[in-house]
Image (spheres, rainbow, N blue to C red):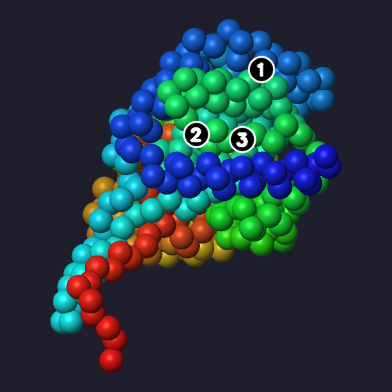
Amino acid sequence: MTLRDHIYDMGRRGREAARQLGILPPEKKTAILRAMAEGLRAETPALIEANAKDLEAALAKGLSSAMIDRLTLNEKRISAMAQGVAEVADLPDPVGKVLAEWTRPNGITITKVRVPIGVIGIIYESRPNVTADAAVLCLMSGNATLLRGGSEAFHSNMAIAAVLQKAGQSAELPDDSIQLIPSIDRESVRHMAEMNQYLDLIIPRGGKGLIETVISLARMPVIKHNDGICHVYVDEAADLDMAVRIILNSKTQKPGVCNAAETLLVHEDIAPAFYAKAIPGLRAAGVELRGDPALCALFPDVTPATAEDWSTEYLDLILSARSVRGMDEAMNHIARYGSRHSDCIVTEDAQAAGRFLSEVDSAAVFWNASTRFNDGGEFGFGCEIGISTDKLHARGPMGLPELTTYKYLVRGTGQIRV
C-alpha cells in the first residue's frame, strides 16, 4: 500500500468513526477522557523514554534552545498534559447545545443547534503535547482526528497517541477516532490537504512555511495558527512598576511561544524613566534588546533595530523596542507590523485603554495584563487546539465551541410551502 493509499484509508476510517462520535453521549465522552488522563499519568516513564530519543536527535541536529524546550517532556509537563485532558472532561459538552429557537407564523419551529464538524486534520510541529490537546478537544466536541506531527517529535507523538488510543479503548472509544500518521514523509502533508472527501477541516500549527504550504494545497477549509508578533505599549499614564512586571512576564516567562511579546512600544514622554526601570530586569533575564535611535541614545550598547526586526517573531529572548509620540502612533505601528494575535496597553487612563481595546484589531487585546494570558487554559477553555489569527470561523484560543458548527432542526405538523 502506498503512503497516499494508507492516508486515504485512515481518512475513510476516520469518517466512519466520526459518525459514531457525533452521537456519543456526554457521559461516555467524559469517561473516555478521564481514562486517557489516567493513562498519561500511568505511562509517564514510557513517554519520557520516547521523548529522550527525540531530544537526542534534536541535540545532534543543533536545534535552538527554544526549539528543544518546546520539544521536551518531563514529569511536570506530562502531569500538566494529563490535567488538561481531565479539565476538558469536566467542561460542558457543546454538541446539541441550542443556539436559537423560534416559531414561524405557519407553525414551523426552527432550532439552531451545535453539531460536530466531522473529521479534523491537524498538522503540527515540535510540541508533542499538541497530540493530546488536539485529540481530546476534537473528541469532546464529537470529531474524529487525523494527526500528523513533526519529525522532531516523532517518537513522542507516537507514544502519546498510543497511550490515548489504548486508554480510550478501555472506556469504549470508537475505533479510529484518533489516528496519527506513522510517517514523517513531507508528501503526507499533501495527501492530507487534498483529501477533502474525508477531511472537513484542516488546521496547521507550526512555522510560516508549513502554514503557507497547507493553504496552497488544501481543498477544504483551513484555520491558521499564524505568527505571534505581539506588542506591549507602555502609555504615558502607565504605572511604570506594573509595566515592568508585564513586559518581563510577556517576554521572558516562556519566550518560545506565540503569545510572548516581541515588540515594546513606549510613550516618548516616559521612555527614559521606564527604560531605566525595565532594561536592568530584561538584561538580567538574558534578553537581547534591539532598539530605535532614541533607545540607542540612552543605552549605546543596545543593538540598533532594523526594518526587519519590527515584523519578526523571534520566539527567543530578543525584544525590539521603540518610543512613540502617543497611542495613535503605537496603534499604527501595531496595524502595520502586527499579526493580529495578542497586543497589550499598560495605562491608568481608562479612556485611553478603552480606545486601544476597541481599535486594535487582534484576536486578544489586553489592558494591564500580560500577553501570555492569550491561552485556552487561562481563558478557562481547558487545553486548546491553537490560537487562530483568522476571523472566520474561529478567532483566538480555540476550545470546544470553535470545533463545532451548527445545523437547523425544522419541526412541522404537515405544513407545505405555497
Q: Name the residue nearer the viewer: 407 or 348.
A: 407
Across and down, in percent, residue 376 comes to 41, 39
Decide: few, some or many residues near mark 2? Use Cα within 10 Å; few <14, some 14-19, many ≥20: some
Where residue 418 appears, as percent x and y from the top left, is 28, 91
Residue 395 is at least partly visible in this image: no
Q: Is residue 300 left or right of residue 56?
A: left
Please name the amino acid that badge 1 sits on: Asn
Given the image, on which type of amino acid does mark 2 rest?
A: Pro
What's the amino acid at mark 3? Gln
Q: Earlier in the sequence, mark 3 or mark 1?
A: 1
Where does label 1 land, which residue? 51
Query: Horizontal and vertical percent for residue 342?
Result: 46, 49
Q: Quadrant of residue 89?
A: top left
Quarter where residue 339 is shown: bottom right
Q: Quadrant of residue 327?
A: bottom left
Q: Which residue is mark 2?
A: 174
In percent of width and height, residue 212 lies at: 70, 56
Note whether 83 is above or below 396 in the view shown: above
Work out whether residue 67 or residue 102 is closer to the camera in this orientation and state it.
102
Residue at the spot 28% in from the left edge and 51% down from the top edge:
97
**Which residue is outermost to the bottom?**
418
Which residue shows up at 58% across the image and 35% down it? Answer: 176
Camera-side residue: 159 or 315? 159
Q: Which mark is residue 32?
A: none
